[in-house]
Image (cartoon, helix red, strand yellow):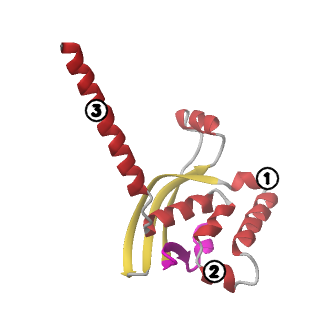
C-alpha cells in the first residue's frame, strides 16, 4: 500500500509540473515592448541579420538603403581596419535588465542595462569565464518602440546607440 501512495504522489508532481510548464510557455509567447527590445538588442550585438524583423516600417521603408545591411557593413569595415574578421565584433549580452515606460498605448521606451563580452565559442567562453580572461562592458541604452500590426517594433535611431 505504501508503494502505491508514493507512485500517486510522484505522478501528481509530474502532472502539476507539466501543466505549469505549458502555462509558462503560453505566457512567454505574450508580446511585450521589453521582450522585443531585448531580442532586438541581442541580435544587434551579435550582428545578426534577424534584427531587421524588430524594426518599425519607418526605418525599413523610408531609407534609401537597408539600414541593417549598412550597419553590418560598417561593423565589417571597422573589424577589417583593426585586422580582424567581422565575427570579432560580435558580443553577447548577459545579466539583462529592462525597464519599460509606456508613453501611450502604442509607444514605449525601454531602458536596457546589461553586460556584454566578446562572443566566442561557448566552450571557450566558459573557460574564459573560469579564468577571468574576458572583459565585460556595461550596456545602458534606451530604445523607443511602437506597436505596429500587434507587434512591438524598434524605432528611432537604434544603430547609433553603442559602439562595439
The structure residue drawn at horizontal position 47% and vertical position 57%, both measured from the top left corner, is 114
Q: Which of marks 1 and 3 is nearer the N terminus?
A: 3
Residue 90 picture quarter: bottom right
Residue bearing the label numbered 2? 59
The structure residue drawn at horizontal position 67% and vertical position 59%, both measured from the top left corner, is 48
Find residue 13 and name its label.
Answer: 3
Q: Viewed as shown, does residue 78 lie left or right of 12?
A: right
Q: Residue 96, how many percent across, how many down?
A: 45, 55
Magenta-colored stretch includes residue 14: no
Q: Viewed as shown, does residue 28 lie left or right of 50?
A: left
Q: Residue 42, how many percent across, how many down?
A: 56, 58
- The kind of secondary structure element at disc 2 is helix
- The kind of secondary structure element at disc 3 is helix
Give the Cα distance between marks 2 and 1.
27 Å
Please identify, in this view, whether the residue under mark 2 or under mark 1 is nearer the observer.
2
Residue bearing the label numbered 1? 85
Residue 126 picture quarter: top right
Q: In which quadrant of the rendered image does the N terminus lie?
A: top left
Where does the magenta region start and end? Answer: 146-163
Amino acid at each position: 500500500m505504501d508503494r502505491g501512495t508514493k507512485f500517486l504522489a510522484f505522478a501528481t508532481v509530474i502532472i502539476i509540473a507539466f501543466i505549469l510548464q505549458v502555462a509558462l510557455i503560453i505566457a512567454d509567447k505574450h508580446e511585450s515592448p521589453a521582450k522585443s527590445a531585448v531580442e532586438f538588442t541581442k541580435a544587434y550585438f551579435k550582428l545578426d541579420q534577424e534584427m531587421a524583423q524588430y524594426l518599425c516600417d519607418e526605418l525599413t521603408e523610408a531609407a534609401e538603403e537597408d539600414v541593417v545591411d549598412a550597419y553590418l557593413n560598417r561593423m565589417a569595415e571597422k573589424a577589417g581596419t583593426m585586422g580582424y574578421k567581422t565575427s570579432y565584433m560580435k558580443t553577447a549580452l548577459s545579466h539583462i535588465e529592462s525597464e519599460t515606460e509606456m508613453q501611450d498605448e502604442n509607444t514605449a521606451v525601454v531602458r536596457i542595462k546589461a553586460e556584454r563580452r566578446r562572443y566566442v565559442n561557448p566552450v571557450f567562453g566558459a573557460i574564459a569565464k573560469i579564468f577571468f580572461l574576458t572583459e565585460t562592458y556595461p550596456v545602458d541604452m534606451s530604445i523607443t518602440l511602437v506597436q505596429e500590426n500587434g507587434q512591438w517594433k524598434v524605432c528611432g535611431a537604434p544603430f547609433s546607440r553603442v559602439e562595439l
